[in-house]
């Protein structure tokens, strides 16, 4: 085999491999599936961030109010419940 034959074989293999990956991507781009998927992922990430923000605010409020209870002279420390077990994230 000559060098030109090898070049043809290699280029054919590369084209086939590229087409195998490129044709489905082109189809997704054409139908808009990739944009829909991206917007769904973005929406889920935003929901997760909102939930984490709510949890952080509640934890801060709990910590603040516990400190107020500890500092209050009218509340015995034995009446203050233990800090709740936090689930591992």
Image (tube, rainbow, N blue to C red):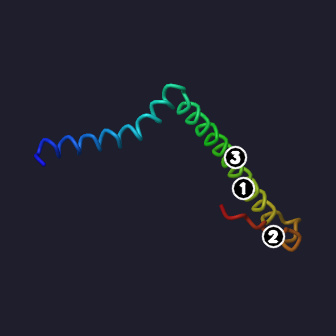
Give coordinates of residue 83: x percent, y percent: 77, 67
Rendering coords of residue 28 (x, y %): 51, 32
Res 51 label: 3
At x 58%, y 37%, the residue is: 42
Most foreground residue, 34 or 13: 13
Residue at image location 38% in from the left, 37% down from the top: 19
- In the image, 58 versus 24, the foreground residue is 24
Q: Residues within 10 Å of mark 1 (few under 14, many from 20)?
A: few
Q: Residue 82 lies in what quarter of the image?
A: bottom right
Q: Which residue is mark 2?
A: 82
Left or right, 6 with respect to 52, comes to left
Q: Earlier in the sequence, mark 2 or mark 3?
A: 3
Q: Secondary structure at mark 3?
A: helix
Residue extending furthest toward the front: 1
Q: Quarter of the image holding residue 12?
A: top left
**Element under label 1?**
helix
Alpha carbons under labels 2 and 1: distance apart:
14 Å
Report crowding for label 3: few under 14, some 14 to 19, many 20 or more residues within 10 A (C-alpha).
Answer: few
Separation (CA) of disc 2 from disc 3: 24 Å
**Which label sits on residue 59?**
1
């Amino acid at each position: 085999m000559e060098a030109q034959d090898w070049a043809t074989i290699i280029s054919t293999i590369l084209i086939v491999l590229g087409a195998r990956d490129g044709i489905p991507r082109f189809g997704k781009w054409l139908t808009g599936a990739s944009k829909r998927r991206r917007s769904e992922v973005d929406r889920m990430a935003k929901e997760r961030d909102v939930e984490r923000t709510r949890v952080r605010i509640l934890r801060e409020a709990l910590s603040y109010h516990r400190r107020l209870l500890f500092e209050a002279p009218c509340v015995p420390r034995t009446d203050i419940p233990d800090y709740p077990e936090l689930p591992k994230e």
